[in-house]
Amino acid sequence: MTVLIHDSRHASTDAAEVALMGHTRAANSVRWAPQCVHTLASMGFDGNVLVWDTRRPASPMATYATREMKRLFPVEFLGDDHVVVGVDGALLVYDMKSHAVKSRGDLGYEADTLLMEEAGLVVAHRQTLSWFRFD
């Protein structure tokens, strides 16, 4: 499946500026990196988190595969070096330098929304909000 990036400043064309092909099933979450305008992460129903440099769209610069594919939810950047995803009632933090899982924490609920703030992460599900502080 393909993630298409359109530049809204050029609304006169329907053509995508960049096509990122890497997921084998539909992508369900896409986030831009806060510190780099060329980096984004996509989470797909294939269980993969792909981190892209849009200047080099031929292949992702990092791929994180999860075996936990029952319920896949948001992807978010934690600073410059980590990506966090909500998967099967847990949060997985991937280290982008080592390409390994840095931590896994059970939530007890499915994360519908992840929001990175300056000092931590807000996780939302229905009427539940959780705050995770990172030092």
Image (tube, rainbow, N blue to C red):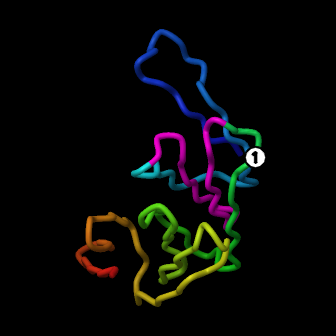
| Residue 75 x %, y % | 49, 62
**Depicted 7 relative to depicted 105: above or below:** above
Residue at 54 percent across and 55 percent down: it is 28
Residue at 26 percent across and 65 percent down: it is 118
> Is-magenta flag for residue 46?
yes
Label 1 sits on residue: 59
Is the C terminus in the top left, top right, bottom left or bottom right quadrant?
Answer: bottom left
Which residue type does callout 1 highlight?
A: Ser
- Can you tell which quarter of the image residue 62 is in? bottom right
| Residue 80 x %, y % | 47, 61
| Residue 110 x %, y % | 43, 78
Residue at 70 percent across and 51 percent down: it is 60
- Can you tell which quarter of the image residue 123 is in? bottom left
- Crowdedness near tag 1: few (<14), some (14–19) or many (≥20) residues, C-alpha within 10 Å: some
Q: Nearer the viewer, residue 45 or 40?
A: 40
The residue sitting at the top extreme is 12
| Residue 51 x %, y % | 61, 55
Q: Is residue 67 left or right of residue 70?
A: right
Q: Main secondary structure of the magenta part?
A: strand
Q: How many marks?
A: 1
In terms of secondary structure, where does tag 1 sit?
Answer: loop
Is the N terminus in the top left, top right, bottom left or bottom right quadrant?
Answer: top right
Residue at 75 percent across and 46 percent down: it is 59
Q: Is residue 60 left or right of residue 135?
A: right
> Is-magenta flag for residue 99?
no
First to last magenta residue range: 36-55
**Depicted 105 relative to depicted 62: above or below:** below
Q: Nearer the viewer, residue 95 or 44?
A: 95
